Amino acid sequence: MAEPVRVRLSGLKKAFGPKKVLDGLDLTIEKGTSIVILGRSGMGKSVLLKHMVGLLSPDAGKVEIDGEDLWKSPSGKRNNLRSRFGMAFQEGALFDSMNVGENIAFPLRRLTKLKPADIKKRVAECLELVHLPGIESKLPSELSGGMRRRVGFARAIAHQPEILLFDEPTTGLDPIMTDALVRVIDELKRRLDPTMVTITHDLKVAFSIADRVALLNNGRIVADLPPREFESSRDPLVAAFVRGDSQLDPDAVD
Ligand SMILES: Nc1ncnc2c1ncn2[C@@H]1O[C@H](COP(=O)(O)OP(=O)(O)OP(=O)(O)O)[C@@H](O)[C@H]1O
Ligand SMILES: [Mg+2]
């Protein structure tokens, strides 16, 4: 039996001033699917992810989570829908005034009924998962960019959400840490069967964690294929992307 649809984006449009970023984008993600979204820098990948979690509202089109229209729901319900997500932001987006432990505990306090001792344990486990054990009392300003990114990742997965959104989780990490994070993602897939949307520029990462690989170009999803098919696709845009050509023009949306 086909899995139910978890996230459906239809006819999504978003412009910032004269710049059209999303231009009638359609994308359907079934429950338990890991989809990787590729696309040139500035194409709107982060903007797309922020629409899924309701941080940006579309100019036109619909965002549905488990069949519920995110922007037709009353705000209480919208927050409820949002709590199903865990998102690791591209820029880390840690709360600067909170230490690492408090950052990771934040969604646990807000979204779960865990007792303080269990929260502490869960925070420690999440830090171990990202190979940063025992750094609870450090402030974000004391960490390197890669460390902040991993703490952001730990915070996104802490409450074991049904839908995980990772914006460039491995960018700036060394190959060993990249492999470690890919293993954590694999483990999450096996253990929790989440619906996962990952943005990455690293094709190796993409092909190792994806059930489907999608290409965002000029405001739309122009390809959405299983990794093997994506890699060997003869579609000119996909093939150019896989080869690393600069044929995909970021300024071509008009
Ligand atoms: N809040 C905002 N206000 C105005 N413009 C924005 C805003 N957010 C994004 N943009 C613009 O939308 C476009 C897409 O940005 P986005 O961050 O989604 O790109 P991206 O595909 O994630 O790029 P990268 O690979 O570099 O992370 C860019 O031109 C950016 O300047
Ligand atoms: Mg981005």
Image: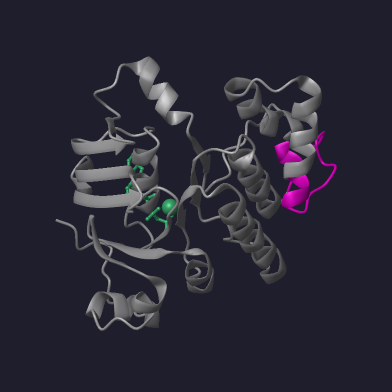
Q: Is residue 163 magenta?
A: no
Going 69% across and 63% down the picture, which residue do you hit?
A: 180
Seen in the picture, residue 164 relative to 254 is either above or below; the reply is: above
**4 lies left or right of 103:** left
**Image location of residue 8, percent across then percent down:** 28, 44
Tell me if residue 209 can be seen: yes
Q: Nearer the viewer, residue 161 or 40?
A: 161
Determine the residue located farthest toward the left in the rendered image. Answer: 254
**60 lies left or right of 90:** left
Q: Quadrant of the N terminus?
A: bottom left
Seen in the picture, residue 178 relative to 238 is either above or below; the reply is: above
**Image location of residue 88, percent across then percent down:** 54, 44
Going 35% across and 17% down the picture, which residue do you hit?
A: 75
Determine the residue located farthest toward the front in the rendered image. Answer: 1
Going 37% across and 19% down the picture, which residue do you hit?
A: 77
**Chief SS of the magenta region:** loop
Q: Quadrant of the C terminus?
A: bottom left
**Image location of residue 172, percent across then percent down:** 61, 61
Q: Which residues are magenta?
A: 127-143
Q: Is residue 138 magenta?
A: yes
**108 lies left or right of 68:** right
Q: Nearer the viewer, residue 123 or 90?
A: 123
**Image location of residue 104, percent across then percent down:** 68, 34
Going 72% across and 39% down the picture, which residue do you hit?
A: 141
Tell me if residue 246 can be seen: no
Q: Quadrant of residue 18?
A: top left
Q: Quadrant of residue 247?
A: bottom left
